[in-house]
Image (cartoon, helix red, strand yellow):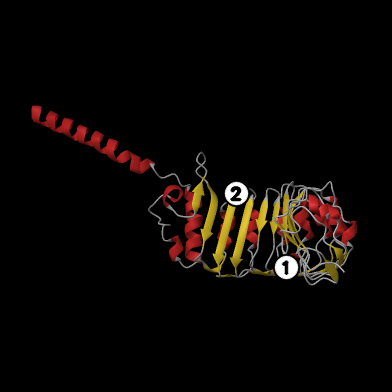
């Protein structure tokens, strides 16, 4: 009678020991099963690239998979950041990651095709970066309906066509980078309606044409604006003003034409590049009051003496050369 009882006790103790030792491994899986299935389908659609080798079905996607982050309370995938190594097209299954807040696809030169419409299903998405890829086609209109977006970066791709005016309808957008593409047409007049504060607008290195819309002058809190290397023409003086809070403005290598003498500069301005335009007039004395890190007005039609003071002489010869009749230090003396 004692032997079976002893055996049962040993078995019970062994079972208890087994549960204590191995229970954590059973409960460690935090990844939501639906999200895990979606990610594995994406991996298969991308033909199992080496950059996703850690995406092993037998491991926890929240804790052991590279490029994946989960919310610590809900354990739903809320961030996907993949740099380098993808090829093919962006998998349509990405739209099934319904809790995604951040999507970053960066430096994938063999990733092509268009931006899939399934991304429009990511209603929680706040940060969208698809940059330095071979993505082509138009900027999709559905982005303007994704109201939680705070940042859009589609730079360094081969996107074509016009810029959708609906992007200005995104209420909390504070950063829009569309630079280094092949975009055409004018800058939408609606872009003066961006409601986000300290706004960064980068549209450089495209094929944009026409006049800069005067509505952009209505927004007082642009932070960094880069419209360089396009085919923009006409006036841009309305982008300046003492009440503005802009810190950096690059309008270089366009066909802009206005009189610089009448411009009043915001005190926040530390970076100004106007080179290779058709700007005339003289350099205002107000430039001496600004703490410039960079100023370039070369290759324009400016005349008169360079005001003395501030940072203007420290900036050097190349900031001013190739103008009609600009003179004074650091250029040659005025006659």
Quadrant of the drawing holding the N terminus:
top left
Judge left or right: residue 201 versus residue 57: right
How many numbered circles are shown?
A: 2
State which quadrant residue 155 falls in.
bottom right
Residue 213: x and y in percent read 85, 60
User: Residue 292 or 151: which is nearer the viewer?
Assistant: 292
The residue positioned 44% from the left and 53% from the top of the image is 65
The answer for how far apart the CA atoms under marks 1 and 2 are is 45 Å
Instruction: Specify whether residue 103 is in view.
Output: yes
User: Residue 60 or 231: which is nearer the viewer?
Assistant: 231
Residue holding disc 1: 318
* Vertical side of 15 occupied by 65: above or below: below
* Vertical side of 281 occupied by 97: above or below: above
Judge left or right: residue 3 versus residue 252: left
Of the numbered discs 1 and 2, the one sitting upstream in the chain is: 2
In what element is the residue under mark 2?
loop
User: Residue 127 or 285: which is nearer the viewer?
Assistant: 285
State which quadrant residue 51 falls in.
bottom left
Residue 259: x and y in percent read 89, 62
Dot 1: few (<14), some (14–19), or many (≥20) neighbours within 10 Å? some
Residue holding disc 2: 101
The residue positioned 79% from the left and 59% from the top of the image is 165
In what element is the residue under mark 1?
helix
Residue 31: x and y in percent read 46, 47
Closest to the camera, between mark 1 and mark 2, is: 1
Quadrant of the drawing holding the C terminus:
bottom right
Residue 79: x and y in percent read 55, 50
């Amino acid at each position: 009678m004692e032997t079976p009882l002893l055996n049962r006790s040993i078995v019970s103790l062994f079972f208890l020991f087994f549960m204590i030792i191995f229970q954590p491994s059973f409960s460690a899986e935090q990844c939501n099963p639906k999200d895990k299935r979606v990610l594995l389908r994406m991996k298969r659609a991308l033909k199992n690239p080496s950059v996703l080798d850690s995406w092993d079905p037998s491991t926890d996607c929240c804790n052991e998979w590279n490029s994946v982050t989960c919310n610590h309370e809900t354990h739903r995938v809320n961030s996907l950041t993949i740099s380098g190594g993808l090829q093919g097209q962006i998998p349509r299954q990405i739209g099934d990651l319904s809790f995604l807040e951040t999507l970053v696809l960066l430096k994938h030169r063999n990733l092509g095709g268009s931006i899939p419409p399934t991304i429009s299903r990511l209603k929680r998405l706040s940060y969208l970066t698809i940059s330095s890829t071979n993505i082509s086609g138009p900027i999709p209109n559905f982005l303007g309906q994704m109201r939680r977006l705070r940042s859009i970066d589609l730079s360094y791709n081969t996107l074509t066509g016009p810029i959708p005016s609906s992007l200005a309808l995104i209420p909390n957008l504070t950063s829009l980078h569309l630079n280094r593409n092949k975009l055409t047409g004018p800058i939408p007049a609606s872009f003066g309606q961006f409601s986000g504060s300290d706004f960064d607008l980068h549209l450089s290195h495209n094929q944009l044409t026409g006049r800069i819309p005067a509505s952009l002058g209505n927004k007082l809190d642009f932070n960094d604006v880069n419209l360089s290397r396009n085919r923009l023409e006409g006036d841009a003086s309305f982008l300046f003003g003492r009440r503005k809070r802009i810190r950096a403005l690059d309008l270089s290598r366009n066909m802009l034409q206005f009189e610089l003498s009448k411009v009043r500069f915001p005190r926040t301005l530390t970076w100004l590049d106007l080179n290779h335009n058709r700007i005339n007039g003289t350099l205002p004395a107000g430039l001496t009051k600004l703490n410039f890190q960079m100023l370039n007005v070369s290759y324009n039609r400016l005349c008169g003496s360079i005001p003395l003071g501030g940072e203007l002489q420290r900036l050097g010869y190349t900031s001013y050369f190739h103008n009609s009749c600009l003179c004074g230090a650091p250029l040659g003396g005025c006659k």
